[in-house]
Structures are given as C-alpha cells and as structure tokens.
Image: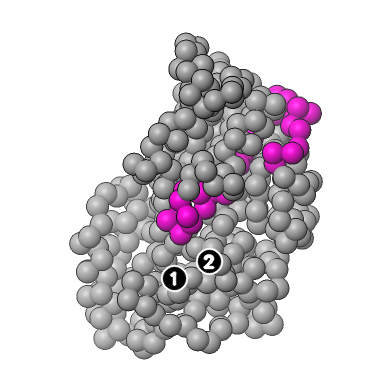
Amino acid sequence: MSPQEGALSSIELFAGAGGLALGLSRAGFDAKTLVERDPRAVATLQANAADHSGNWPVERGDVEKISFTGYEGVDLLSAGPPCQPFSIGGLRLGSDDHRDGFPATVRAIRQARPRAFLIENVRGLTFPAAKDYFGYIVAQLRDPSVQPGPSEAEHKSALAAVTEHEYEVHWALLNAADYGAAQQRVRLFIVGLRTPLTGWQWPKATLGRQALVDALAADDYWQQHEVAAAVRDRHRLELAKIRSTLHGDSGAALRWRTTRDIIAELSARTTTNDPHSRVVAGARLYKRHRGSLLDWPAKTVKAGVHGTPGGEHIVLLDDRSHRYLTVRECAALQGFPDDYVLPAPRSVALRQIGNAVPVQLAEAVGRGIAELLRKGA
C-alpha cells in the first residue's frame, strides 16, 4: 500500500506494535517517523511497513532523548505513552513512575509544534487518585511552550497565569466496541488543536449495545452462526445476567460485534499453518476471571507479564468447555489484519497486542482529526 495522495503528515511516539499507526494510516496520515524503544516492537513495525502502511520509517530510541525540532509544523503528533503508571494492572505510581511518558510527550509537542496531537492512555488517569496529575497534564498540553521550572508548583503557577492557550484540548473515554472492535475496551483519548484550529467533535459511534441485545433476542444472529436452539437459549439466559448490569448506549443502529463473529471470520480466512492460529492448552478459570462470552464483545485484551493474564484471554464455548483465545484471535479483536506479522514467542506477541490501540478506534478518531485539519488548511 502506497501513501495516500494528499495524505497529511504525522509522527508517532511510543509506537508499540502499530495499532495506532495503522488506524491513522487508514485515516489518511503519512507517518514521517515512528519512535519505539523496544527492539521486538521495532521489528514488528518494520515487518509490516511495506504491506500495511507503504511508508513507516521507524526510529529505535527513547522519546525523551530524541529531538523533534526537525518535524516542526507536522500535521499530527500521536502518542501512546506507557499506561502502567496509571493502570489497574500496574503499580499506579503516576508521575512517580519512571515509565511515565507524558513529560517526554509534552516536550515533543513543544519542539514539533504540530497542528494537532492525539494521545491515548488508560482511563485510570481520570480516576480520583490521578485527578490532580491529569489536570496538570492537560494544563501542560494546552501550553507546552511553558517549560518546567525549578519546582512543579512554580510550573503550575506559570501555566495557570496563561490567558490565551496554544492548544485547544479535549478528552473523552471511548469504548472500542462502539467503533467496530469486538472487544469492550474503554480508553482515554486526548485531542489537541493548535490555535486557530477549533471545532473538534468526537466521532459518532457506529455500533451499539442495544442493537446487539435486539439481535440476540431475534433468530437471525443465531441462524447465521448455525447455533442449535438449546445452546442459543442457554446463552440468552447467561447474557441476560450481564445486560442488566450495563448502562448507557451509543444508540447506533448496527450491533456490537461479538467474539463468535471474530472466531467465525478467522476460521473462514486463516490457514492451519499459521502458528499464531494454534490453540494452546492449559486454560484455567479463576474466581474473578471467568473468560469471555462467545456472543458478546470480548473482555479487554490485556498485556500481562507473560502475555496472558489468568482468565482474561479465555473464551467460554458452546459445549461449556473453555480455551485460550489464539494469538491471531486476540489480534483480530484489536483490529489487526489476518496477515499482520507478529513475533514468534506467544507471550511477546500477546504483550504487543494487549498494549496496542484498537485499529478501528484509532481510524475513527484519526478521520475526525484529518477532516478538521483539511478544513483548516
């Protein structure tokens, strides 16, 4: 795939396995550089550049040690800073965690002065425990040229004194299931527009929970997947238990995609010689980790220490048994193409997948940014 004609320029920090980059490429952005420190993730990006982006110049290195002045005026700076400082699965040390990538991200924005920026992270940043630091992050993103002083207090004071901001900053929690991923994954997205750009609106959800509830109450879904009546009725009872605990819906006419959808699609497309399509034995369920239901979006695909957290990457089957989701199934839940090249060790591949941004969600937000940038050109 060659870069799109009239594509907008972008640079990306903490690129990982490329989920965000792939979605932005589909949205019309031509990456001038993808910065990533981990050598295995760099190899994944390089292995997929020709087939899935047309142009992914990858730079291996630490974001905080690289100068971005050469990219001044780039259309978009995107970043997925490490989420462990703010995630439930991490130590939640926030700004005290050495993995906190926000200071380096602000520094890169200060140097590159992009027309817009897009940052993705875990929703833990919006929780009460991180409220003060999140406010500090937003203040820095509004005025990145106000550099840190001798103390954080002085920096905050200088930021508070600014009356005309450099960037208009918006943030929201978005669920990947609402945008085409067969996975319930709620993540924080931050969009910044450099003055005088304005008028940001979050992309409208294209799929909805209620539409899936309605589909499960009818027969077409079950007939499409050739599910026996007895199994269908049992699944309906199981699904009724979780539906009653959920609130809010996008109101979209199209239904959420399910784990069964993904497995069926992969079975029809993939070949048996793909090592990432093999089922690994030894799946176990735990008290608080009961696996994903077939006829509902999967649980959030996570990045465990060994690639697969207990019970998280497990699917409950029609015959009441359960198994691990394959690497390829987890990748599909994140929106990666069937032929996306992933590293051979299963644990490494799953860790890269779990850290990625769902491709469909990245594309949806990216298209909104691209449209606004073109209008403001």
Rendering coords of residue 8 (x, y %): 68, 33
Describe the element under mark 2 as helix, strand or loop: loop
Which residue type carries mark 1?
A: Glu
Q: Could you tell which of marks 1 and 2 lies nearer the N-terminus?
A: 2
- Report the span colored magenta: 63-92
| For residue 93, side relative to residue 22 (left or right) | left
Residue wearing tag 2: 304
Q: Nearer the viewer, residue 350 or 32?
A: 350
| For residue 170, side relative to residue 74 (left or right) | left
Residue wearing tag 1: 312
Which residue is depicted at the point 32% across and 56% down?
209
Pointers 1 and 2 in contact (C-beta within 8 Å): yes
Which residue type carries mark 2?
A: Gly
Which residue is depicted at the point 70% across and 27% down?
112
Above or below 242: residue 108? above
Q: Main secondary structure of the magenta part?
A: loop
